[in-house]
Image (cartoon, helix red, strand yellow):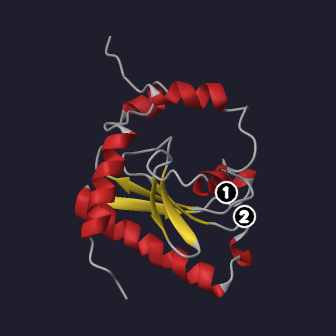
Amino acid sequence: MRKIWAPWRMQYILQADKDKGCILCDKPAQKEDKANYILHRGKFNFIILNKYPYTPGHLMVAPYRHIGNVTEADDREAREHVELIQTCVRLLTEEIKPAGFNIGMNLGRVAGAGLVGHIHTHIVPRWNGDHNFMAVIADTRVISEGLDTTYNKLKDGLARLPKQG
């Protein structure tokens, strides 16, 4: 039998019902970007590494303002949100070279939102064969790189990325 080492999952399992508040409001307010995996702070939105990723490099773009629907974003928030999604795609393309991306929002619990009430966009890098039989047969995902390693790689890459605009 092969073993899959994913020690960060236990923290998620044990805290699943204990989290209070909104992590997308709380984490940026703590001003501990590395500990909270915040890669970049814009004026209205920020980029954060998903702590429980589907694949290595799974990022999220979220506004600082606690809004529950994309229609509530003002023009400046919406414009910067899309610009940061573009930055994420350029960064991930340069640093981890995925074959494609899944990009999207889940608005409302019935749509699959795990963080209801605070919009955010997922940027999920994908590779051919990144999900094999494990997800179907064993209800298990294999994440091949630790969060700290991914964070450091992407933070360094972000500093090298040419500024757009």
Query: Which residue is the extreme one toward the top?
Result: 1
> Residue 142: image x %, image y %?
38, 33
Seen at 75% across and 47% down, the residue is: 21
Q: Camera-side residue: 40 or 8? A: 40
Name the quadrant of the C terminus.
Answer: bottom left
Q: Which residue is mark 2?
A: 66
Circle 1 packing at 10 Å, graded few (<14), some (14-19), many (20+), is: some
Residue 143 found in image quarter: top left
Indicate which disc, 2 or 1, sits on the residue closer to the N terminus: 1
> Residue 31: image x %, image y %?
55, 55
Q: Is residue 51 above or below residue 10?
A: below
Q: Secondary structure at mark 1?
A: helix
- Is residue 46 toward the left or the right of residue 119 in the image? left
Q: CA distance from mark 2 to mark 1?
A: 7 Å
Seen at 33% across and 47% down, the residue is: 150
Q: Which mark is residue 143?
A: none
Circle 2 packing at 10 Å, graded few (<14), some (14-19), many (20+), is: some
Query: Which residue is the extreme one toward the front?
Result: 31
Q: Camera-side residue: 135 or 77? A: 77
- Is residue 117 toward the left or the right of residue 125 in the image? right
Q: Of the residues shown, which amino acid type is indicated by label 2?
A: His
Q: Is residue 137 above or below residue 63?
A: above
Task: Evaluate if marks 2 and 1 touch, with contact meaning CB atoms under 8 Å apart.
Answer: yes
Q: Which residue is mark 1?
A: 25
Seen at 63% across and 66% down, the residue is: 64
Residue 2 found in image quarter: top left
